[in-house]
Image (cartoon, rainbow, N blue to C red):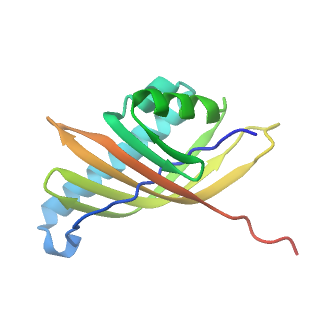
């Protein structure tokens, strides 16, 4: 059975409420999260695991239902195992938090698999922890879960 990946991050540590941030900082944080969402979706849909792994820091980590994958080699192996040609990823950003050079982006996602795939749709929640590297934001940690499908009636 194929493994499925979805963008999610688990944030640990102190997090400042966005209500205490100036409006322009909140907007900047939201724009950075939206940009990472779009970049991650495009990398995932490309079918090229290297494009997904390139978004992470060198010691980046993914916490998935299948396990914890840390570092470039582990992320590449896991990403390669789940990628399916024709996969479509749609993330919906729900919240952002920034503390200095750390940005936490959380939301919901829907993965739609191509015709003929044993799985059609997977939904769930994600949290991404981004760290500032120069002028760029990089994935330090991605955590996600799956939302079980409704029970058959």
Q: Quadrant of the N terminus?
A: top right
Tell which residue pokes out farthest to the right in this image: 153
Q: Using the image, determine if residue 67 lies above or below residue 127.
A: above
Residue 23: x and y in percent read: 15, 66
- Labels in figure, total: 0
Residue 60: x and y in percent read: 35, 39
In the picture, measured across the screen, residue 35 lies left or right of residue 16, that is: right
Residue at position x 21%, y 67% in the image: 14
Residue at position x 22%, y 70% in the image: 18
In the picture, measured across the screen, residue 68 lies left or right of residue 106, that is: right
Residue 7: x and y in percent read: 48, 49
Q: Using the image, determine if residue 60 lies above or below residue 90.
A: above
Residue 128: x and y in percent read: 38, 52
Residue at position x 62%, y 48% in the image: 111
Quarter holding residue 117: top right
Residue at position x 41%, y 54% in the image: 9
In the picture, measured across the screen, residue 92 lies left or right of residue 58, that is: right
Q: Quadrant of the C terminus?
A: bottom right
In the picture, measured across the screen, residue 48 lies left or right of residue 72, that is: right
Quarter holding residue 146: bottom right
Q: Using the image, determine if residue 55 lies above or below residue 32.
A: above
């Amino acid at each position: 059975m194929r493994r499925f990946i979805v963008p999610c991050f688990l944030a640990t540590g102190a997090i400042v409420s966005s209500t205490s941030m100036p409006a322009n900082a909140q907007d900047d944080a939201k724009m950075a999260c939206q940009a990472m969402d779009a970049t991650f979706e495009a990398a995932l849909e490309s079918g090229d695991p290297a494009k997904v792994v390139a978004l992470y820091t060198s010691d980046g980590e993914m916490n998935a239902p299948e396990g914890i994958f840390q570092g470039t080699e582990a992320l590449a192996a896991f990403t390669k195992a789940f990628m399916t040609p024709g996969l479509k990823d749609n993330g919906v950003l729900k919240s952002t938090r920034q503390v200095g050079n750390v940005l936490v982006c959380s939301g919901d996602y829907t993965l739609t698999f191509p015709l003929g795939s044993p799985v059609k749709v997977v939904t769930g929640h994600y949290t991404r922890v981004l760290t500032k590297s120069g002028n760029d934001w990089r994935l330090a940690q991605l955590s996600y879960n799956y939302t079980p499908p409704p029970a058959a009636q």
